[in-house]
């Protein structure tokens, strides 16, 4: 990045911060703060181990320093400005989840557009929120668009703030479905039937929530699809599973036809073939419904995370808090475009053009000198794809 480009970005970031109203996180004075300035050269340098007392009023600091990136810690400390983690005196930490489109299994880098990547990341966010709401019942959480390629969720529920890394790792494993076993989802009931001298056991796939309900719902939907097929097609489909030949396929299909209501209730002991088929749906369900979070972020009690309201130095988009009621309608490439950067054009020299979706419009940008809406030009400059044109 050339110095005139860097100077322009610094100046426009300052203009944004002069107008912005920044709401600090709860317990802001107990947290460590850090930022990355607009430095010369390709390397970025993190300034950290600062307390809010070191920085001063956050809005004044941002307008004065106009940093490239700004962060605060998940952790709360006795001495947040101490120069080493051992000196800070850790008290507790928010539980942070980070979803990054670059790391999503369904995203193909180089093929998916920025908008497509963010849409897939939003789908993953909904899956994560299902776990946090339904499985854990967390009350105090905040959703944030990162300003880059994904979303953050800050959980500040009192029940999790004192968890250490090991226990946070268990939460990671749960939402990722790591190590999930079929038998863990089975409940055994004792049944005393008529004419039986001894009671028998009935194995039930959990339907009352959690991974059991997810596996059950996906399995039942699959059986309904099978039953809607002609018999030959259904048997062929069943034999696509490893270990299920013609005999087991026929047995499973007949059991599904004759015991649909029992299976709906979770009973997988109607036939061995049904239970074996249901077991195959654990991996399928985990693959489709896990939350592909950035695992080290959640386990790290000292993690620094982006400040909502600040600007992302790699996109010139704003880091936005999102009210839960507004999540469905939130459009990151529209709602995160700062108003400060709209309404006028500037001239830049583009080195790597392409199709840009931003601000509700699609721009086909060619290489070379040209005039662009400032928010598009800033986006390209921040990403290293354009330079401010010489004046």
Image (cartoon, rainbow, N blue to C red):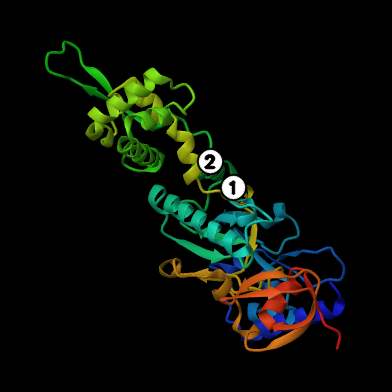
Q: Distance between the residues labelled 2 and 1?
A: 17 Å
Residue at (66%, 66%) from the top-left corner? 71
Q: Mark 2 points at which residue?
A: 173
Question: At which x and y percent is residue 97?
Answer: 56, 54
Which of the two discs, 2 and 1, labels the residue nearer the N terminus? 1
For the residue carrying disc 1, how many other residues have a C-alpha within 10 Å: few (<14), some (14-19), or many (20+)? few
Relative placement, left or right, of 173 versus 388 is left
Residue 188 showing in the rendered view: no
In the image, is residue 32 above or below residue 249? Answer: below
Residue at (34%, 26%) from the top-left corner? 274
Q: Mark 1 points at which residue?
A: 105
Residue at (42%, 55%) from the top-left corner? 138
Which label is found at residue 332? none
Q: Quadrant of the N terminus?
A: bottom right
Question: At which x and y percent is residue 6?
Answer: 81, 77
In the image, is residue 311 above or below residue 188? Answer: below
- Closer to the eye: label 2 or 1: 1
Q: Quadrant of residue 23?
A: bottom right
* Secondary element type, mark 1: loop
User: Which residue is at the front of the view, 120 or 251?
Assistant: 251
């Amino acid at each position: 990045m050339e110095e005139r480009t860097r100077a322009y970005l610094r100046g426009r970031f300052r203009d944004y911060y002069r107008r912005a109203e920044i709401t600090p996180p709860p317990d802001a004075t107990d947290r460590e703060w850090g930022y990355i300035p607009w430095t010369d050269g390709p390397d970025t340098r993190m300034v950290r181990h600062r307390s809010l007392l070191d920085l001063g009023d956050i809005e004044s600091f941002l307008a004065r320093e106009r940093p490239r990136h700004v962060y605060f810690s998940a952790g709360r400390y006795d001495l947040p400005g101490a120069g080493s983690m051992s000196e800070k005196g850790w008290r507790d930490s928010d539980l942070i989840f980070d979803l990054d489109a670059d790391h999503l299994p369904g995203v193909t880098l180089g093929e998916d557009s920025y908008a497509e990547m963010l849409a897939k990341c939003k789908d993953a966010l909904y899956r994560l929120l299902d776990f946090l709401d339904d499985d854990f019942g967390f009350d105090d959480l905040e959703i944030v668009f990162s300003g880059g390629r994904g979303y953050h969720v800050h959980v500040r529920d009192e029940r999790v703030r004192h968890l250490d890394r090991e226990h946070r790792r268990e939460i990671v494993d749960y939402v990722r479905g790591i190590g999930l076993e079929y038998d863990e989802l089975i409940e055994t009931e004792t049944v005393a039937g008529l004419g039986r001298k001894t009671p028998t056991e009935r194995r039930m796939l959990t339907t009352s929530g959690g991974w059991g309900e997810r596996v059950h719902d996906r399995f039942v939907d699959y059986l309904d699809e099978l039953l809607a097929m002609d018999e030959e097609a259904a048997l062929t489909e069943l034999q696509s599973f490893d270990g299920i030949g013609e005999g087991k396929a026929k047995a499973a299909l007949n059991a599904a036809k004759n015991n649909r209501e029992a299976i709906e209730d979770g009973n997988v002991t109607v036939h061995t073939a049904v239970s074996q088929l249901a077991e195959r749906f654990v991996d399928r369900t985990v693959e489709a419904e896990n939350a592909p979070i950035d695992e080290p972020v959640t386990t790290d009690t000292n993690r620094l995370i982006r400040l909502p309201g600040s600007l992302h130095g790699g996109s010139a988009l704003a880091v936005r808090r999102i009210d839960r009621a507004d999540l469905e309608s939130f459009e990151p490439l529209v709602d995160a475009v700062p108003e400060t950067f709209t309404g006028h054009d500037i001239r830049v020299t583009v080195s790597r053009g392409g199709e840009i979706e931003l601000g509700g419009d699609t721009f086909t940008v060619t290489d070379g000198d040209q005039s662009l809406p400032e928010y598009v030009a800033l986006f390209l400059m921040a990403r290293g794809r354009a330079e401010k044109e010489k004046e």
